[in-house]
Image (cartoon, rainbow, N blue to C red):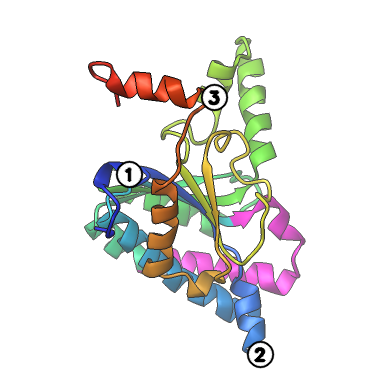
Amino acid sequence: MIVGVAMNQVPRHIAIVMDGNGRWASKRRMPRVVGHKQGVASLRRCVKACAQRGVKVLTVFAFSSENWNRPEEEVSGLMALFTMALGRELPKLKADGVQLRFIGERRGLSPKVVDGIEHAESATVGCSRLILNVCFNYGGRWDIVQAASKLAKQGAEITEHSLGNAMAMAHVADPDLVIRTGGERRISNFLLWQTAYSEFYFSDKLWPEFDEAELDLAIESYSQRERRFGRTPEQLVEQVSLPGGV
């Protein structure tokens, strides 16, 4: 438990833009891929910490659709690291009750990467302690377009409700808290639809430096905020005071 934070104040769904791997390596005059390897270790710590703190869903931005524009050597290194890390981490994740879901466009990925993704999803389908959504070859605009395209092909009416149900992350509730590391203050095409009412926390820590203490600071900051969803403070007080209020 986090000191001063009640269990009902812990966000059920945390989403993270894991930024700063390359800069972490560059500061140490190392190849950028070394930073990405350290980023995997940081993600391992974060998954464990979230499960311990009662978080039910963790969504991470692992590879954006814009990342293909990076140098070919870095992209190929990322793909190799992804498949290697997936195979290495899968047994531990499954043993810890972590269900893996991969969100993003799979067309264009190598057969080896797609096979690894499909195997990891099927191997952890029964796990229920924590859902780990890995956004890979993902973009928020892509998500909205694919949802609208799906509805159009079905001849279905496009409404806020139907579009939400067609999104790639319709299997979980929207994020309560979005964390971005690396000191940047932007969303970078991440979960554009799903973060309409999320709380944001920006950390100056580079992702390989992000640890349990920094996660606790983010959760503590979240616990002190008042989420109104368009309502007035008076309406929130009335709702809490009603029988069955939250």
Q: Is residue 227 left or right of residue 29?
A: left
Q: Position of residue 166 (x, y in %)?
A: 54, 25
Q: CA distance from mark 3 to mark 2?
A: 48 Å
- Taking depth in this image into account, of 119 and 9 the one nearest to the observer is 9
Q: Residue at x 52, y 39 (%)?
A: 198
User: What's the amino acid at mark 1?
Assistant: Gln
Note whether 228 is above or below 14 in the view shown.
above
Mark 3 highlights which residue? 230
Judged by depth in the image, the label closer to the viewer, 2 or 1, is: 1
Mark 3 or 2, nearer chain start: 2
Task: Please identify the quadrant where the N terminus is shown.
Answer: bottom left
Residue 9 disc label: 1
* Tag 3 secondary structure: loop
Mark 2 or 1, nearer chain start: 1
- What span is in magenta? 63-88
Q: Residue at x 65, y 23 (%)?
A: 148
Mark 2 highlights which residue? 29
Q: Position of residue 96 (x, y in %)?
A: 24, 58
